[in-house]
Amino acid sequence: MRLSGNWGEGLRVQARLDKLDLSLANALSRTAGLGGTVTGALDFSQASDATFPQAIARLNVDDFTRSSLGGVSSPVDIAFVGRLLPDGGDARALIKRGDTTIGRMVASLQPLGPGAGGWTTRLLAAPLSGGIRYNGPSSVLFSLAGFADQSLAGPIAVAADFSGQVRAPQLAGQLRAEKLTYENETWGTRLSQMAVQGRFDNDSLEIEQIEAVAGNGRLTGSGTIGLSAEQGFPIDLTVRFRNARLARSNALGATATGQLRITNGLDGGLIEGRIIIPEARYQIIRQGAAEVPELTGVYRKSELTEDGKRPTRVRPAGIFRLNVSVVADNRLFVNGMGLESEWSARMQVTGTSAAPIVTGEARVVRGTYSFASRRFELTRGIVSFEGGPLADPQINIGASTTAEGVTANINITGSGQVPRIAFSSTPSLPQDEVLSRLLFGSSVTNLSATEAIQLAAALNSLRASGGGLNPLGQLRSAAGIDRLRILGEDDTTGRGMALAAGQYLTDDIYVEIITDARGFTAVQLEIALTRALSLLSATGSFGGSRAGLKYSKDY
């Protein structure tokens, strides 16, 4: 790129481009994702801030692409010629895919005379005429939106003529698309066989119908999208879905039935409606990385007003108010970290899309919790959302099991961020006695020195502070072991209280060594054949060798 010009008494810039790599823009914006090369010339001049500028552009872009996590748009070549002068302007663009022309654009305008105000006012009020024709891959047009984790594929056709003014264009034409595929990498949403039918009517695009397949369900919608900047680009869309799979990822899977209405205008946007969740699955994953807090109330010194006051910040664009009710009668499955459960929920989501406020509660229908090789039945489960952060609800969960002649109870209260765990029993026993029987199968008075240390560490780790000593966790971390656990006695194999250490050799092969104080040693090997089927093999010093198959599936 070669630049020349002057600045001071007016502004004059001349630029000559020779196969300039557009990926240079990616260093300035992490969401740009531009690719291709541009060749051509740009000339701009303006005598003063009050005078009407003059601009001439001749650009050829080769292999233009826009990339995101969802993929890379189809490469196209773009030729653009345009000029802007005080007495008028025009622009022409051509989009080619290989040797085939898939898009054309022609536009012209006639700025108003000097008496109509400043040059920006004259430009926005200038009469506009022209048209656009496009018949090609939707990924090219969708890529211009720059969504980092979304993609759209399939053919689309647009034919529209425009008139009116630059600030309020009037369009007439049609939009047609079929067999589109939309994917959202964040939520795992995939809409296939999507068909869109719409028409341009003056200052709006009327979506007559949208249809798409979402998993085993369907999604339909209709509404209008405004094209007038003076009216705040108004939107009024209604989307209906039935058994539509709107999320599918390693941690979350959900189908939904209901209706949402999305509106937007000068007074802001609103999303309202009712969602019924016939089935959802959520996998609990312990977060190991530290969270970086977001600083608020920080301003650049240059942003302060003359009297030193902080400026009033404008609400970011794209923020919608929320008024959505969410209902799940059952089949809301929550699994992970020893929990296998089914829940129902009644919640109301208000606030904004940037800071949602959730009220309501979720109640357990049935479930179990595994702790220290014991299986607890959930007897009580209430998770209450009281308008605070979604990740920090109030918890009231109870579970019980029978161990060593007593009924042991686990009670979890507090909040999602600071849970409090306590043990009780029937007949009533001290908490350390209950935990001793759960972990080691015997009274606290019969524990060895090592077992007493482990019991103290377990009790300490259950405190609300969460900062207790965890020798097993530190040992596992230091040794690079993937899994370290304590196993109870097993009369079948002759194993006493034992320590098990395991390591994943690959994503599909897991090996574990088990040993106790009596000389028992065993090696277990698990090979995942599929997501549900695994091959098991075990060799022990007392019980010989054995092999088998394990099949597991969520119902």
Image (cartoon, grey):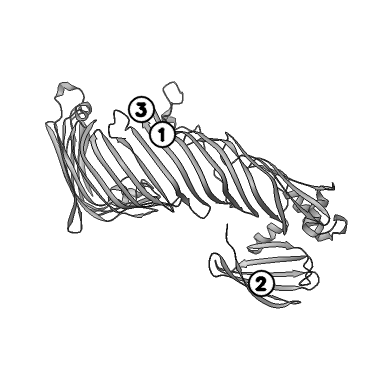
Q: In what element is the residue under mark 1?
A: loop
Image location of residue 460, percent across then percent down: 75, 49
Report crowding for label 1: few under 14, some 14 to 19, many 20 or more residues within 10 A (C-alpha): few
Kind of residue sitting beneath label 1 = Pro
Q: Is residue 219 above or below residue 303?
A: below
Q: Residue at x 68, y 73 (%)?
A: 523
Q: How many marks?
A: 3
Please name the residue that numbered disc 1 is placed on: 316
Q: In what element is the residue under mark 2?
A: strand
Report crowding for label 2: few under 14, some 14 to 19, many 20 or more residues within 10 A (C-alpha): some
User: In this orientation, does residue 287 appear?
Assistant: no
Q: Work out how far the residue at label 3 is from the one at label 2, CA to CA, in angstroms.
A: 65 Å
Taking depth in this image into account, of 284 and 400 the one nearest to the observer is 400
Taking depth in this image into account, of 471 and 487 the one nearest to the observer is 487
Image location of residue 161, percent across then percent down: 17, 39
Could you say which disc has been placed on residue 524 in the image? 2
Could you say which disc has been placed on residue 340 in the image? none
Image location of residue 144, percent across then percent down: 30, 46
In-image side of 99 versus 319 (left or right): left
Could you say which disc has been placed on residue 266 in the image? 3
Reading the chain from its start, which is encountered first: label 2 or label 1? 1
User: In this orientation, does residue 307 appear?
Assistant: yes
Kind of residue sitting beneath label 3 = Leu
In-image side of 62 versus 245 (left or right): left
- Labels 1 and 3 touching (C-beta < 8 A): no
In-image side of 491 versus 346 (left or right): right
